[in-house]
Amino acid sequence: MKKIVLPLIIMIIAVSCIFMSCQFDKSIGQSGTSLGTVDMDGDGTADGTAIDTDGDGTADGVDTDGDGIIDEAWSEAYTIIATDDSDANQETSSFAGKTLYFSGVVNNSAGYWKGNEWNDLGSNLSNSSDSIASGISIKDGDIYIGGDYNNSTLGYRCGGYWKNSTLNEVDSMNNYVNDNGNFPLKRPVTIYDIYAGANNILLSGYTMKKTNVTDQKEVPVAWLNGKPSDFNTPMNSPSAGYSELYMYCRDIDATSREVSFPDKTETLDYFFGCGNYPPVGRPLFFKFGFVDSSGTSTLLMDRAYFIDDRGEALDIFIYSITQSGGIVDNYEVYIGGLKNKSACIWKIVPDESSSTDITETCTILDTTSSESAVNTVIKTTTALYGGGYITTNNKKIAGYWYNSTWIALGDGTTDSIVKTLDVAGDDVLAGGYIVNSSGIKVAGYWNNGTWTALGDGTTDSSITDSSITD
């Protein structure tokens, strides 16, 4: 009888210990830094990735499905069989020691990550459970987040920007009829991007103009310090008679210059945007600026061009800008997007002496997958980068194009997408998300190919924009 009871007691204790470990190990569900592949069953092959959650250089758990989240508690019986070379690259990359900011969404709530810490903004909205942070800009230590939210009281979306944690709503203009034929106080607003300049805040997006129940149009708008300037009749624009119709302003890039005027020196900021004209599927870009004078900012719309292609513009980058006499006289425009469901980048060189002449070329980056897109584009002196995704076997695979070479970051087992890129020297930081084995989007970033999860993997999270400070 004793020979039976003793093993039974030992077995019960062992099972209880295993059960308690599984129930109370706090590392499960956390993210951290990869330490390399790990052998869990002693056969010498990799079964997952060892994860360090607290930065002490030791493993706290194992990621078994590749989403950067710990699925199994660490055991001393496990062996790290290969260090992660890309992780070493991460430690020595140009982004090491810098503060990484990402705007995004967690569980339908706007906010941002500073490093790995999530700062929720949407939960402070008493009249909304659906908000999005679409852009981020850092200026003089202040954090500016552009976004919008569904106002459950008014019944439509409102927008603006958070300065740190304080929401500043934009003026969305009147002249909107709801489905009941009544005029509400504001038009619905969608915000796409934000830029914090020396003295001014610029937002891009669109409002809905609806003068009767059936006549509804998307009107592109740039908000300067909360005040709207729509693009109904942009100066020197070949599209002046049409630009009001179903068009929206998606992304902005900006440069600042000190320029000399006859009587004083003022700061002149040039802003460039890309947008779309859905009825005919035409992307476009535009250039405008404003002058600071005695505390008053005046928006100066310069010109807008339709691109002679059917497609969708998603991001814009301005490269090699020069000026003379306070006037921009040379620059290159790179617009990332898609044409016929294929990733592409348009290069546009405007003729500043003409209101209509431009030279444009379109480079198709992907011709094999069923769908692909360039969500973010960067030009350096040596290379052109386009971050986005390709589609293989009905799965979106995150990655980026280095010139015309595709570099995959996702493994193709679940959907993944790159939404933001930052480049410093040969180092590439790509923000986006990976869908885990439970079908949940997990926000995070790849630093030279090494994945760091920001979302906890229990509820959907995603990144929309990035900013990096020293």
Image: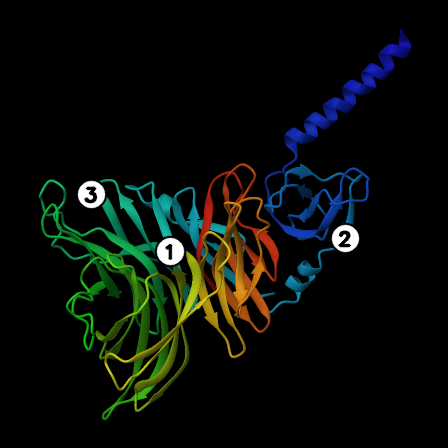
Disc on the earlier residue, 1 or 3:
1
- Write down the residue under mark 1: 134
Q: Which residue does the image show at 14% across and 68% down from the upper left?
A: 241
Which residue is denoted by mark 2 in the rendering? Answer: 82
Q: CA distance from mark 1 to mark 3?
A: 21 Å
CA distance separating discs 2 and 3: 56 Å
Taking the spot 25% from the left edge, 50% from the top edge, the residue there is 158
Residue 388 screen position, x and y as percent = 48, 58
Residue mark closest to the camera, 1 vs 2 = 2
| Label 1 Cα neighbours within 10 Å, binned few <14 / some 14-19 / many ≥20 | many
CA gap, disc 1 to disc 2? 38 Å
- What residue does disc 3 label? 154
In the displayed structure, 345 sits above or below 82; it is below
Q: Earlier in the sequence, mark 1 or mark 2?
A: 2
What secondary structure is marked by label 1? strand
Look at label 3 and name its amino acid.
Leu
Frontmost of labels 1 and 3 is: 1
